[in-house]
Image (tube, rainbow, N blue to C red):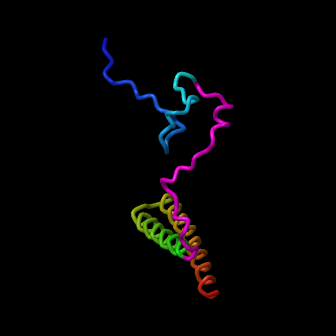
């Protein structure tokens, strides 16, 4: 009997963000890493979803405010298509989003008054 699907490739789960260093002699795929190996391996940050560290706080807060406002509109629009407890739960989520929006807006007001 033949196997229809191929075997998955051998990959290192710790190298999801960067390629492993092939010159490293400790990089063997023929053994299971121990707890000591895992703790000794330096943690490499994955920069796929990194926010630009050079952005000013006001810019970050303005973006957060716009994101929360968009999420509030989407939740409210979706709640219009629901009934019962699902609608009430989504309206509660929209209210929590709006409270976050108000908080970010207050911080933006304080930053503006300092300038």
Asked if residue 54 is among those painted magenta in the image, a careful observer would answer yes
Magenta residues, dominant SS class: loop
Q: Nearer the viewer, residue 45 or 76?
A: 45
Q: Position of residue 5 (x, y in %)?
A: 33, 24
Which quadrant of the figure has residue 37? top right
Q: Position of residue 70 (x, y in %)?
A: 45, 69
Q: Nearer the viewer, residue 112 or 47?
A: 47
Q: Quadrant of the C terminus?
A: bottom right
Asked if residue 66 is among those painted magenta in the image, a careful observer would answer no
Q: Quadrant of the N terminus?
A: top left
Tell me what residue is drawn at x 48 percent, y 68 percent.
67
- Left/right of residue 73 with respect to residue 26 in the rendered view: left
The relative height of residue 7 versus residue 88 in the rendered view (above or below) is above
Q: Position of residue 99 (x, y in %)?
A: 59, 72
Q: Which residues are magenta?
A: 32-58
Q: Position of residue 32 (x, y in %)?
A: 58, 25
Tell me what residue is drawn at x 68 percent, y 31 percent.
36
Tell me what residue is drawn at x 57 percent, y 22 percent.
31
Tell me what residue is drawn at x 67 percent, y 36 percent.
40
Counting labels gives 0
């Amino acid at each position: 009997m033949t196997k229809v699907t191929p075997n998955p490739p051998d990959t290192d789960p710790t190298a999801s963000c960067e390629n492993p260093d092939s010159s490293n002699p400790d990089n063997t795929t023929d053994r299971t890493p121990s707890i000591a190996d895992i703790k000794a391996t330096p943690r490499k940050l994955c920069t796929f979803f990194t926010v630009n560290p050079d952005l000013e706080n006001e810019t970050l807060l303005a973006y957060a405010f716009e994101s929360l406002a968009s999420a509030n509109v989407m939740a409210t629009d979706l709640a219009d298509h629901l009934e019962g407890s699902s609608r009430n739960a989504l309206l509660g989520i929209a209210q929590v989003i709006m409270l976050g929006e108000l908080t970010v807006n207050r911080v933006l007001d304080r930053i503006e008054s300092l300038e």
